Amino acid sequence: MELINEVKGSPKAIILAGAPGAGKGYVLKGLNLGGLKIMNIDNIYIDMLKQANVSLDLKNATPEERSKQAKAMADANKQFKGDIATTIEGKESFILDGTASSSKQTMKLKDELEEAGYEVFMLYVYTDLERSLKQNQDRFEKSDGKDRSLAPAIVLRTWGSVTKNYDEYKNAFGENFVSVSNTLEDEKLGSLDAIVDKYLKPYSPKDTKPKSPARAAYSAKQKEKANKEITALLSDEAVANIIDNSVSKEEAQGKLRQFLI
């Protein structure tokens, strides 16, 4: 069934939320969304990295490559914002394939879409921090160099942000919200320190410029704050709410079908 042909009246937008490697594509798989526009800044970013001759194995980037990455991301963001604006202006239905790690930007986009006459839905996919890091670590090699592996510190921060945003998104989207939990079946590491030792330390940036004392102190303070937040999120109590309120892949797909009719 061509779901896009059933879209009537208001244009529809589906916002995907979840850390890298959460399995958002896995949940969408099986839905015939061939006619629905999918927007992902990664497609632009990867093309720009290739044009700059930067390896997509970003977890092992050199200082020169990190500088080129930052420029490529800034350029990709600028182009992507223009693409989003054009899509909204044309009243096209679409899927925004991203992490929704910034609640401020996501809620702003939701408001803009609704003001433009869109119906907006969020598919939120939760996964363990360790699974997210493991999926990211293996992505470049498993894709034979065709897909990028991010710096694990970025994955860590993104996981923390999107996990923290769960309640805000659930409340804001109401009936147009569904979450799926996609967690590790294997035994997980017990602490943030153990996770950092295994997934972050082997890829710590090398040959970085030394920071000023003030900058180093600020960075250390921000890192301590972030680590406390993530440690709290790693507790069973913090994620139990997400897991308990999540549904199966099939139930989520059913809700998406209803939204698109």
Image (spheres, helix red, strand yellow):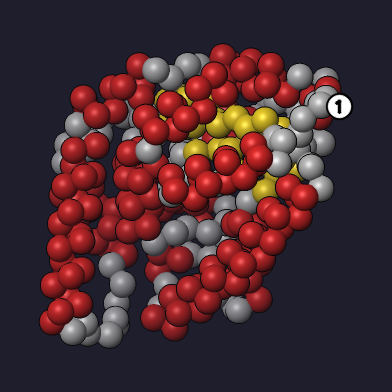
Q: Residue at x 82, y 36 (%)?
A: 35
Is residue 254 shown to the viewer in this render? Answer: yes
To which residue does mark 1 refer? Answer: 5
236 lies above or below 69 = above
Is residue 131 shown to the viewer in this render? Answer: no
46 lies above or below 4 = below
Give the farthest residue toward the front: 115
Q: Nearer the viewer, residue 218 or 135?
A: 218
Name the spot of residue 34 as percent of width and height, x first: 79, 35
33 horizontally vs 247: left or right: right
Q: Which residue is drawn at 60% across and 78% down?
A: 53
Name the spot of residue 125 as percent of width and height, x first: 47, 32
Q: In which quarter of the image is the N terminus?
A: top right
Few, some or many residues within 10 Å of mark 1 (<14, 14–19, 20+): few
Q: How many labels does the image show?
A: 1
Q: Which residue is drawn at 21% across and 26% down?
A: 236
Name the spot of residue 30 as percent of width and height, x first: 68, 25
230 horizontally vs 136: left or right: left
Name the spot of residue 209 as percent of width and height, x first: 27, 85
Q: Nearer the viewer, residue 204 or 48?
A: 48
Where on the picture, by quarter, is residue 187? top left
Give the farthest residue toward the right: 5
Report the amino acid beneath label 1. Answer: Asn
10 lies above or below 54 = above
215 horizontally vs 37: left or right: left
Q: Residue at x 79, y 42 (%)?
A: 91
Q: Quadrant of the C terminus?
A: top right
- SS at mark 1? helix
20 horizontally vs 111: left or right: left
Q: Nearer the viewer, residue 136 or 228?
A: 228
Where on the picture, by quarter, is residue 243? top left
